[in-house]
Image (cartoon, rainbow, N blue to C red):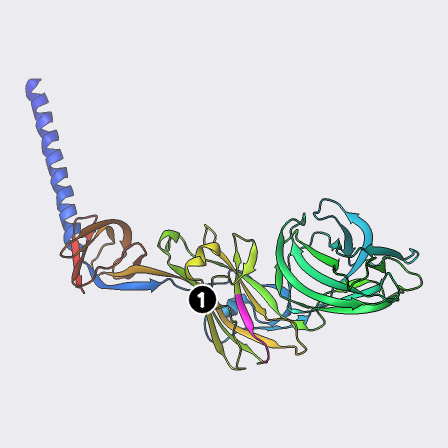
Amino acid sequence: IVVVLSLVIIVAIIANIVLWSYEMNQLDWEKMKEDTSITNVERVTHSSWFTAESEYTMNEGSLVSGDYTDTQVVGDPYETFIEGIIDQQEFHLHRADVSGVTPAGKLMDTTQPPSNQSETTQLISRGSSVYFYTSPLSAWSIENGTWTLYIWASTVSSGKVSRLTVRIHLVSSDGTVEKATIGTVTDVIIDYGYSERTITISGSAVSVTSGDRIRLTLYAQPGAQNDSKGMSFYYDGYGTYETLGHETRLQSPGGGYGLDLNGSFSIDVSTYPLAYIQTVEIQLRYRAYDTGEKWYLKAYNWSSSTYSDSGFNSTAGHTPTTGWDYYAVNLTDKWRSYVRDDGTIYVKFVDEGADSDRTIIDIDFLGVRAEIDGTRFTFKNEGALTSHLVSLWIINSTNHERYDINVFVNSAETTAYLRSDISLPKGQYTVKVVTERGNTAIYSGS
């Protein structure tokens, strides 16, 4: 029995030795068959271009031909848009109070007074103001242009005058925050006798965030030269003065043509982590058939919840030539306000304001990219087996830096590998890559 057991043990040991020897020979054979090299190492200063992921959202204007995929590479085909008619908004002044706003005020909206409602008067004492608010608005881009206030007004005392200041602001939903001044006009003379006064206010472009309101302030200026009893106006109904189409109302700019579109883009933060991005660039190649107006690139600011170009290297816009033009902006060190944690960035392309010419615009390319200080490695596998690269060394006279990698290179293939967190040292350096089988490849550069 002892002899038999001894033979069994000897056979098992010999079998394991043979198996181990076979496995070692197999590993040695695979190692000898592996032939991986580093063919190039180069500094990378920017990411690839990231283009629109879906069709552009048209806020003003319309799509004529093509689709968003035509804007992903330079050259034919391209996508064509045409400016649309920008509607004027007319805000009628109403006697209803608006709740929850400071300072307290009354409503103005696009609804006309009921046809059977009699007009009423509102007194503004000297040195005092009255306020009118729109209902909370949807997101909206208000262009540069002229606002017009039509008001049936008179100073109270015969032979006297009042001086009126008109202010238009974009405010928060509760009125406590003045988010932007749209326009102001002062020293408007209101003499005795009710008549329909037409007051124009030069307005600036603003972006309305959902929930914002527009506030109209009517201020009877102080001073002994003005009627001590103030001024008054008719509004919100019909009668002796107000008639259909001649109500007291505030009219926004409009009546011209404009284009405003947004696109959604996404930087690949798995390849280009936010921690290694230095800034972001937006580039456009377009053709506009009108040289009379400027065009602007803006991005959605996640901090202020509005489209903006604040902090861009240029906010002057671009004037087209009617040929193909390149227009690019850099987001400088303010880029982080415009890029969400997942790499999403919303880009707006918009004209400077409504005008009388209806322009056709071709977009050949629109994209964003990240500026980095990284390195691209090119690996070539001339062996018979797939190589698995597991570690990378950057070596110079003062440093030996090791990095974990996980790169597979198939037989007879060449693979480019980008690392945005690896910067090449100055002067002479050596790059070494190690495979899972223990082979190494060396590259020397400077």
Q: Please state which of residues 270 and 101 is positioned toward the viewer in this rendering.
A: 101
Residue kind at label 1, given as amino acid type: Asn
Residue located beneath label 1 in the image: 313
Residue sitting nearer the eye, 21 or 67: 67
In percent of the image, x 82 and y 62: which residue is there?
A: 248
Position of residue 291 measured from the top left corner of the image (x, y, whole percent)? 57, 81
Q: Position of residue 355 (x, y in %)?
A: 66, 75
The mark tally for this picture is 1
At numbered mark 1, what does the secondary structure look like: helix, strand or loop?
loop
Residue 265 in the figure: left or right of residue 427: right
Question: Picture quarter containing residue 382?
Answer: bottom left
For the N terminus, the image quarter is top left
Residue 258 location (% of width, % of height): 64, 71
Look at 32% across and 56% down and name the residue there. 420
Q: Is residue 56 visible?
A: no
Instruction: Determine which quarter of the picture holds residue 18.
Output: top left
The answer to whether residue 259 is above or below residue 179 is below
Residue at x-position 54% and y-position 53% = 304
Q: Is residue 1 left or right of residue 254?
A: left
**What's drawn in magenta, residue-wise?**
292-297
Within 10 Å of disc 1 (Cα), the crowding (few <14, some 14-19, many 20+) is some
Residue at left offset 87%, top offset 56%: 121
Q: Is residue 39 magenta?
A: no
- The reply to whether residue 254 is in sight is yes
Residue 79 in the image: above or below residue 115: below
Q: Residue furthest front?
A: 224
Check the picture and name the quadrant holding the C terminus.
bottom left
Q: In the visual, does 442 lie left or right of 180?
A: left
- The residue sitting at the top extreme is 1
Pick whichever, 410 or 134, lies toward us.
134
